[in-house]
């Protein structure tokens, strides 16, 4: 994204008006963890950063080997926000990553660059102009958290201010202990330019929450996902509580996902709507759905990229484990909301993702799968993906149902064997996919070689 002279002038004006003393450059690594570097303000700092960038060690972000690790961060001025969590007045930007060659080549593993490439394919292949995304953020709030792993010890312990007898969906105050916290979160997100649709207590009886935000294009949505997590973690610290987006932080409690509502538009009109069709979704929309479901096992390597992800994706707890679609059925990977009355908001919800995902890679992978479905005319009905308007996981029906991988290793195997749709137009490079698989196998090995406390309970006295 090119930063214009007018943008630079506007930012310099903002620096003066807000008496900004620090410029903060933010960027996530391949895994999705946020990093930053801060620069004291001086005259011409913005033009200097645009022209020269800020050098950093890419190997410390997990991007490249140490012998080829010099890389450059250049801020995207459209992402500017005054950071309310800094004591010194700071203006933050999300950055794009470039190589140090003479051409300043965009780095193929930079999620923001990859997201822009994926967005460009909407026009190229679908007949639409834009993809729109609305995330749901599910998370738990705890009053106290302790955890540690050592050679001779491993434990976690959480304390929660809430404990309902059963399903706590839409619980009311005073029993909903954290409604005021969610109110504060909404006010803060509004200051960041993020519009909240609603918030409420989620199903989990021990502090599970949900905040849903309005639709934005892909890159903006991915930036917003990073911002929401940054804001909530900081707000939690200010309020002396602990939040986690882990998919399954508690045994026998509902997991936390990041459901993604999506649709396409052409000249401002919904490209997926056709009145009277199933869910009012037209043939293009069905092809998009077909692409998601046919490629769903591969997608899970990016939408559910942690070992903890698959402790959530088990039958029960409304877990979206089946590669099917339906209206209002929360056991399907894809749900077409049945409460929509506005044709322009006709959409479907992809339910498997969780917040351990790198949002740029996650949303881009989903879009690439949908584009693959449109290009290859993958009809979900003909492929046997539904629609299924029944409880899929009770196995009381005769239809053959395909399911998501049971663990991270299975999802990586699926990615390794079939990544062609992701590589279309080199959006996901071979280098990125190989690096991803290598990194995730290291995580799996770390878990597999560490004794689990529950294993002591099961096996210590055998």
Image (spheres, helix red, strand yellow):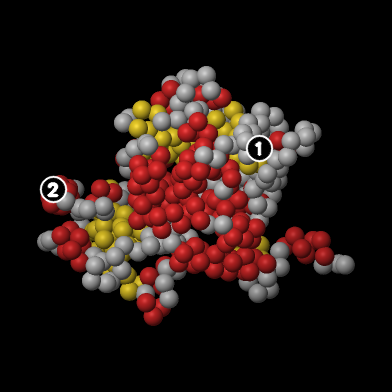
The alpha-carbon separation of the residues under discs 2 and 1 comes to: 53 Å
x, y percent for residue 78: 25, 48
**Residue located beneath label 1 in the image:** 384
**Relative horizontal placement of residue 313, taking residue 242 as reference (left or right):** right
Give the total of numbered labels: 2
Residue drawn at x 45%, y 30% as measured from the top left: 272
Nearest the eye: 425 or 119: 425
Categorize mark 2 by other alpha carbons within 10 Å: few (<14), some (14-19), many (20+).
few
Residue drawn at x 20%, y 53% as measured from the top left: 3
Question: Which corner quadrant of the image does residue 352 belong to?
Answer: top right
Inspect this view and state whether residue 420 appears. Answer: yes
**Relative horizontal placement of residue 114, taking residue 357 as reference (left or right):** left
Q: Name the mark nearer the viewer: 2 or 1.
A: 1
Categorize mark 1 by other alpha carbons within 10 Å: few (<14), some (14-19), many (20+).
some
Residue drawn at x 31%, y 48% as measured from the top left: 84
Quarter of the picture containing the C terminus is bottom right
**Residue located beneath label 2 in the image:** 6
Is the residue 335 above or below the residue 431 in the image?
A: above
x, y percent for residue 51: 18, 63
Identify the mark nearer the N-term, 2 or 1.
2
Which element is circle 1 on? loop
């Amino acid at each position: 994204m090119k930063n214009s002279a007018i943008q630079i002038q506007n930012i310099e004006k903002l620096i003066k008006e807000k008496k900004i003393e620090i410029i903060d450059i933010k960027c996530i690594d391949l895994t999705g963890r946020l990093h930053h570097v801060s620069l004291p303000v001086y005259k011409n700092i913005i033009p200097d950063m645009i022209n020269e960038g800020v050098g950093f060690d890419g190997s410390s972000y997990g991007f490249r080997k140490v012998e080829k690790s010099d890389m450059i961060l250049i801020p995207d001025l459209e992402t500017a926000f005054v950071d309310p969590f800094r004591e010194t007045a700071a203006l933050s930007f999300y950055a794009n990553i470039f190589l140090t060659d003479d051409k300043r080549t965009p780095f193929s593993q930079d999620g923001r660059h990859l997201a822009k490439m994926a967005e460009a394919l909407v026009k190229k292949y679908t007949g639409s102009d834009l993809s729109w995304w609305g995330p749901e953020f599910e998370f738990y709030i705890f009053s106290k958290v302790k955890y540690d792993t050592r050679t001779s010890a491993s434990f976690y312990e959480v304390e929660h201010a809430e404990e309902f007898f059963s399903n706590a969906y839409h619980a009311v105050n005073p029993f909903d202990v954290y409604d005021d916290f969610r109110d504060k979160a909404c006010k803060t997100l509004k200051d960041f330019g993020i519009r909240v649709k609603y918030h409420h207590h989620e199903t989990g009886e021990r502090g599970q929450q949900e905040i849903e935000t309005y639709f934005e294009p892909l890159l903006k949505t991915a930036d917003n996902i990073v911002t929401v997590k940054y804001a909530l973690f900081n707000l939690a610290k200010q309020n002396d509580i602990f939040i986690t987006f882990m998919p399954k932080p508690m045994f026998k409690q509902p997991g936390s996902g990041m459901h993604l509502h999506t649709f396409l538009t052409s000249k401002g009109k919904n490209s997926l709507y056709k009145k009277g069709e199933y869910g009012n979704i037209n043939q293009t929309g069905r092809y998009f759905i077909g692409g998601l479901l046919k490629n769903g096992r591969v997608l899970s390597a990016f939408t559910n990229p942690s070992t903890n992800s698959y402790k959530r994706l088990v039958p029960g707890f409304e877990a979206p484990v089946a590669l099917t679609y339906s209206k209002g059925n929360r056991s399907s990977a894809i749900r077409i909301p049945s409460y929509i009355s506005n044709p322009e908001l006709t959409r479907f919800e992809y339910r498997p993702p969780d917040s351990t995902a790198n949002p740029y890679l996650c949303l881009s992978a989903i879009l690439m799968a949908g584009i693959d479905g449109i290009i290859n005319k993958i009809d979900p009905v003909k492929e046997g993906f539904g629609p299924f308007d029944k409880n899929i996981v009770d196995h009381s029906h005769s239809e053959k149902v395909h399911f998501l991988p049971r663990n991270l290793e299975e999802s990586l195997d699926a990615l390794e064997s079939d990544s062609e749709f992701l590589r279309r137009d080199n959006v996901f490079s071979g280098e990125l996919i190989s690096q991803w698989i290598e990194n995730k196998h290291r995580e799996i090995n770390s878990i597999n070689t560490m004794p689990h406390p529950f294993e002591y309970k099961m096996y210590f006295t055998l």
